Amino acid sequence: MSINRKSQMEIMGLAIIIILLMLALVFVVRFTLIPNQNAPKKEFSQAQIAANTLNAMLQTNVEECNEATIERLFVDCAQGTRIIQCTHITYGSDACSFLFGPPNANSFLFNEILEPTLGVWKIPYTLTFNDGSQVASDAGDEKCSAEHVGTVYSSRDLKEAKIGLGGGTVLIVQLELCS
């Protein structure tokens, strides 16, 4: 009887080893062969960052410009009315110079809105208007744009806001984020 008991114990040992090997194989397959499920979440997050940044930027009140929103400053600048006056020494006194700064200098949008968020997070971005003029970009020579996707950047998210100027004219503000 002791031989049968010894044989049974050996078979139980082999069964336990086989079960452990199967569990190890399941973990290997799960974590190496099945694609990462976080990729869609990252893409969704990047698109949400673009949309939320643009919306938050447009709704931000600027203390130096009588609490006018950035959207209102864009309208004032695009219409050329120069109604809104700002009191910031560095960025200028009218909406255009306040938002975009003097030539070859950083602007309010760059210094106070985009760089403290997207710049700190190291997300390449470009802010443009419907005429194609580039307002702010941190990407240097490698501008965050469609032509650099696949070579410099792996993906690009473009979000735009349309601002009515009256008379059927629309100002389009675009924020492009690359990764």
Image (tube, helix red, strand yellow):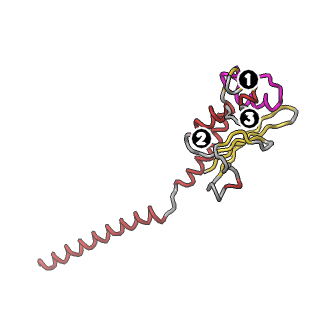
Task: Check the image and report above or below for 154 versus 105.
Answer: below
Which residue corresponds to mark 2? Answer: 118
Which comes sooner in the sequence, label 2 or label 1? 1
Of 46 and 20, nearer the camera is: 46
Q: Do labels 2 and 3 touch, CB within 8 Å? A: no
Residue 93 shows which numbered tag? Answer: 1
Which residue is nearer to you in this view: 133 or 89? 89
Mark 2 surroundings within 10 Å by alpha-carbon count, few (fewer than 14), some (14 through 19), many (20 or more) = some
The segment highlighted magenta reads: 62-86
Q: Amino acid at mark 1?
A: Ser
Q: Nearer the viewer, mark 1 or mark 3?
A: 3
Residue 26, percent from left and from top = 40, 65
Residue 80 lies in what quarter of the image?
top right
Say which element carries label 3. loop
Q: Amino acid at mark 2?
A: Leu
> Visible in this render: residue 72?
no
Indicate which disc, 1 or 3, sits on the residue closer to the N terminus.
1
Residue 73: within the magenta? yes
Q: Earlier in the sequence, mark 2 or mark 3?
A: 3
Res 79 seen here: yes
The residue at 76%/38% (across/down) is 162
Inspect the image, locate mark 3, and give the three-letter code of the amino acid beneath it.
Answer: Pro
Could you tell whether 25 is left or right of 132 in the image? Answer: left
Tell me the quarter of the picture where residue 130 sits.
top right
Distance between the alpha carbons at the discs numbered 1 and 3: 15 Å
